Amino acid sequence: MKIAVIDQLGNYGGVSRVIKNLLPALKEKHSDLTIEYFSNFTAIKREKLFFFLKKKNIKITHLQFDRLPSLKLIKFLKLENFIIKIQNKFKNIISFLPTFLSGNLKKELEKKIKNYDLALFPWPFLIDFPKLNCPVVGIFHDFNYKYYFSGQPTYFPNQLNHLNEQVPIWLKNSYPVVSNNFIKSEITKFYPKFSKKVKVINLGPYSEKIAYINNKKKIKIFPFKYILCPTNLCGHKNLGILFAAFNKVSKKNPRIKLILTGPYTDLVNGNSCSNGMELNRKRKNIIGLGYVTDNILENLILNSLMVISPSVYEADNGPCTDAWYHSIPVAMANIPSNIEHVKRQKVHASLFDPYNYLSISNSILKIIKNYKYYKKLAKVSKKNISRNYTWEKTATGYYQLFKKIYDPKKIN
């Protein structure tokens, strides 16, 4: 079976770590699959995907739709947003131009994705549904665009309009996959007529194959004790309340710091306070590192006191899953998707109300005060998640779906 995997955006973090685990697992488990991965230049280079995919005989093909705004000269002149705006505004008029100039991704995919048995889209958002001559599988990560959390909205108005227009088209014309029952319930709520189509396939720990492939010796990056929060700056990540909570923690434990990783978190450095955080590059107890490599992230997890996830909305919780995989204690928000982790994967965490900074601080202090106990629970979590949720099982779930789609006689 020949599969095209189209990852047009090449997301930071979660989706890229899914790619690095899922595609190699599919090839290892099912040698009859031929996989070709399509993505943009920047993401392929940033995520070192040649390293992860080439050794598994997964072909990598660069998409051209974003090449013009990505050119060094264009970036130097700070014209990339202007070019993208022109491409989007006049996309129907300039569609006859080569994709490199027009930025027409739909046209590029319709031209390139031919003679494949199936097309897999790991993030079918902000993309027009292409007319392909094969079945399409879409992995619908979450539906956070249906909510407003706080601060700057996650999507701009034009992006939000596109999501509301195109997602129903994707759900109608693809085989939708989600990572847990909570996200399936979100489809049931917002798009009820497509609920019965949805297939739930749980994901393995993001660290599983990345840690094995890197196979690096454990490196101590910081000389002090710290709590790790892999995140980004979107409103639903709930960082302001976390900072206020950490202010209470730091008063009792002044030597412990809070480390953030993720896109643009390098902008967030300073000292916790009752308002959240005072920006300060000196003597800081909150340190934002920005987006880091897999190897650095793995070592940050391994050396952390605990991993914390204050987010009020998640699908699969990658940071906590990685912590459980490495026997690291977890503090996380008491939200439906996280509770599903606890119940189904039989893992342990110190749960808190994400809207209450005292609840968050008490949850952190509980782990610090009873660290041996929570470390023991973390080891139990590792044992359970390693037995029940692996990328081999995830790959089998996807393979069974692919075979069902590929054989028309098996489609209900």
Image (cartoon, rainbow, N blue to C red):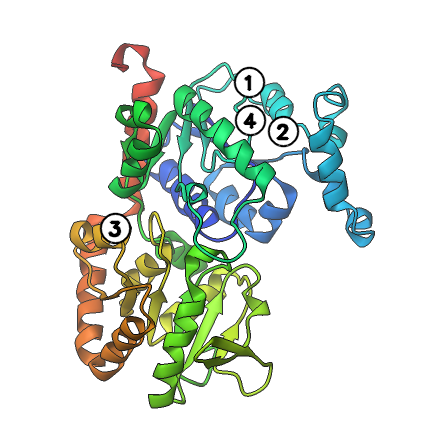
Q: Earlier in the sequence, mark 1 or mark 3?
A: 1
Q: Are marks 2 and 1 in contact (CB under 8 Å)?
A: no
Number of the front mark, 4 or 3:
3
Distance Cα–Cα, label 4 vs label 3: 30 Å
| Amino acid on which the number 3 mark rests in the picture | Pro
Q: Which residue is mark 1?
A: 114
Q: Are marks 1 and 3 in contact (CB under 8 Å)?
A: no
| Amino acid on which the number 4 mark rests in the picture | Asp
Residue 61 placement (x, y as % from top left): 60, 34
Query: Picture quarter containing residue 339?
Result: bottom left
259 to 13, vertically: above or below? below
Residue 30 in view, yes or no: no
Q: Which residue is mark 3?
A: 336
Distance Cα–Cα, label 1 vs label 3: 40 Å
Residue 343 placement (x, y as % from top left): 16, 52
Q: Earlier in the sequence, mark 4 or mark 3?
A: 4
**Residue shown at 42%/39% (left/top)?**
23
Number of the front mark, 4 or 2:
4
Distance Cα–Cα, label 2 vs label 1: 15 Å
Q: Secondary structure at mark 1?
A: loop
Q: Earlier in the sequence, mark 4 or mark 1?
A: 1
Q: Secondary structure at mark 2?
A: helix
Along the viewing direction, whichever of 139 and 240 lies nearer the viewer: 240
- Crowdedness near tag 2: few (<14), some (14–19) or many (≥20) residues, C-alpha within 10 Å: many
Q: Which residue is mark 2?
A: 105
Q: Secondary structure at mark 4?
A: loop
**Residue shown at 67%/33% (left/top)?**
65
Q: Are marks 4 and 3 in contact (CB under 8 Å)?
A: no
Q: Are marks 4 and 2 in contact (CB under 8 Å)?
A: yes
